[in-house]
Amino acid sequence: MWRRWTKAVTLGEIAGFAVPAVVAAQVAAAEWTWLGIGPLLQGAAIVMAGAVEGAILGLAQAYVLRAALPVIPTRAWVRATAAGAVIAWTVGLLPVVLGERILRWPPAVLVLLGLTLLGSMGLLQARLLRGQVRKAWRWAVASAGSWLVALGAFALVTTPLWQEGQPGWLVVAIGVLGGAVMAATAAALTGAAIVCLLPVPVSGASVAKAR
């Protein structure tokens, strides 16, 4: 189960993250500036691309999860994942849209926004896991922690590589590279979490089938 999850979710997140990476590079290009597009519209374009990322990621997760928990509808899982991605991208883009003004917000609000960014997807998914696994809320915690580590890995890869004035193709390439590291990290950690949450008999059968 863990191997299947890690492989499928890594590939799904790489494919999904490529969408906002390409869109972000495009809306930052000079021709978009000529069109008069502002930070708000730029952010909206990236958020919509993030919804596509969430849908692809949700499909990858549901593909593996249905072998162990077939009662969870694939469409519902994909919708929850896409909605969580939209929330996360919206929060994550606030500094881009608001600029330095966001630094004047109360620290408690900034902390709440950070928790929302990390926990929105897992929280929405955990609602679907209720009644299917014990203490489904642990999935929300594990998912948030996994994405925190994964985003840290993304930053470690991309921060030293991204430089001002780089061509769009290079910006995208660096983003996809960082996205691949982020995807593998999140997939491995969430895979370990979902295996721990599954009932022992189902988990064992799934692992045996994967082998």
Image: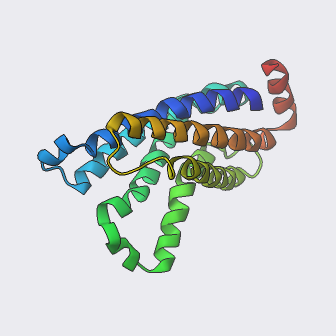
Is 172 located above or below residue 161 in the figure?
Answer: above
Residue 81 is left or right of residue 7, and the answer is left
Which residue appears at 76% of the width and 41% of the height?
192
The residue sitting at the left extreme is 35
When the figure is inspected, residue 97 is found, relative to residue 205, above or below; the finding is below
Rendered location of residue 145, percent (x, y): 66, 55
78 and 52: which one is in front? 52
Residue found 58% across the figure and 52% down from its top: 156
User: What number of labels is visible?
Assistant: 0
Q: Residue at x 70, y 50 (%)?
A: 136
Q: Quadrant of the C terminus?
A: top right
Q: Quadrant of the N terminus?
A: top right
Is 72 left, or right, of 15 in this rendering?
right
Residue 24, picture quadrant = top left
Find residue 198 and report its horizontal and vertical position in percent.
78, 39
Residue 166: x %, y % from top left: 35, 43
Question: Residue 117's spot in the image, x, y percent?
Answer: 50, 57
Q: Residue at x 57, y 56 (%)?
A: 119
Q: Please tell me which residue lies in front, 18 or 177.
A: 177
Q: Is residue 174 left or right of residue 24?
A: right
Q: Is residue 104 visible?
A: yes
Q: Nearer the viewer, residue 137 or 31?
A: 31
Q: Can residue 58 be seen by looking at this rendering?
A: no
